[in-house]
């Protein structure tokens, strides 16, 4: 499917993969560390770690020769996933935690609460519903380019709730 969102969900859309990436971003590297924090079955964890490694989120590095043991190191692709998880955490804290978020994102030095926001890296402008549109990119097929000639699709346009 010619959709960045669909392709991304295909790559990391199951909850185990998201939780593995969360734990890796929090410092987990070894199979036992992932298993201890996630409680996943060894088979499930091995499959997801293998898939994430094959997809380029991790590289395996040997940390012990006898017996041979490996750990999972995040790649640039894996590290670039941090903003996605931070925005998911903030969204979940707002919409899925009626009693307040169980965990807060904070600055590691000051302890001040952090409120992640998606901004345009070039302008610093916050990206919100109604302020982002789509157009065909350099990798778009001819049929997609043709379908987008008619109209530019804009994200948003929903009724805002008072919060």
Image (cartoon, rainbow, N blue to C red):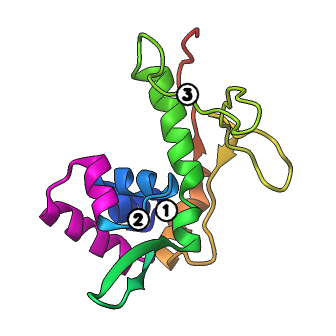
Q: Mark 1: give few (<14), some (14-19) or many (20+) Cα within 10 Å.
A: few
In terms of secondary structure, where does tag 2 sit? helix
Disc 1 and disc 2 in contact, CB within 8 angstroms: yes
Residue 13: x and y, percent? 33, 55
Q: Disc 1 versus disc 2: distance between alpha carbons?
A: 5 Å
Residue 152 horizontal side relative to residue 44, left or right: right
Q: Residue reaching furthest right?
A: 123
Name the secondary structure under disc 3: loop
| Span of residues in magenta | 32-56
> Mark number for residue 4?
1
Residue identifier under label 2: 7
Q: Residue at x 27, y 51 (%)?
A: 36
Question: Depth check: 73 or 121 in front?
Answer: 73
Residue density around tag 3, few if under 14, some if 14–19, many if 20 or more, within 10 Å: some
Q: Quadrant of the N terminus?
A: bottom left
Asked where in the image residue 148 lies, by quadrant, the reply is: bottom right
**Which mark is on residue 104?**
3
In this rendering, the answer to whether 109 lies above or below 7 is: above
Q: How many marks?
A: 3
Q: Earlier in the sequence, mark 2 or mark 3?
A: 2
Q: Position of residue 125 (x, y in %)?
A: 81, 41
Dominant secondary structure, magenta: helix
């Amino acid at each position: 499917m010619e959709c960045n969102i669909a392709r991304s969900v295909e790559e990391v859309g199951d909850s185990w993969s998201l939780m593995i990436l969360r734990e890796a971003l929090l410092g987990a590297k070894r199979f036992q560390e992932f298993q201890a924090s996630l409680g996943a079955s060894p088979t499930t964890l091995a499959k997801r770690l293998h898939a994430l490694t094959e997809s380029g989120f991790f590289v395996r590095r040997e940390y012990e020769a006898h017996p041979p043991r490996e750990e999972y190191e995040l790649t640039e692709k894996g590290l670039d996933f941090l903003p996605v998880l931070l925005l998911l955490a903030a969204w979940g804290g707002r919409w899925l935690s009626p009693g307040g978020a169980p965990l807060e994102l904070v600055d590691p030095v000051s302890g001040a609460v952090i409120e992640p926001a998606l901004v345009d890296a070039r302008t610093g402008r916050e990206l919100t519903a109604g302020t982002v549109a789509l157009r065909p990119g350099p990798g778009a097929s001819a049929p997609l380019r043709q379908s987008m000639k008619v109209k530019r699709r804009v994200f948003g346009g929903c009724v805002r709730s008072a919060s």
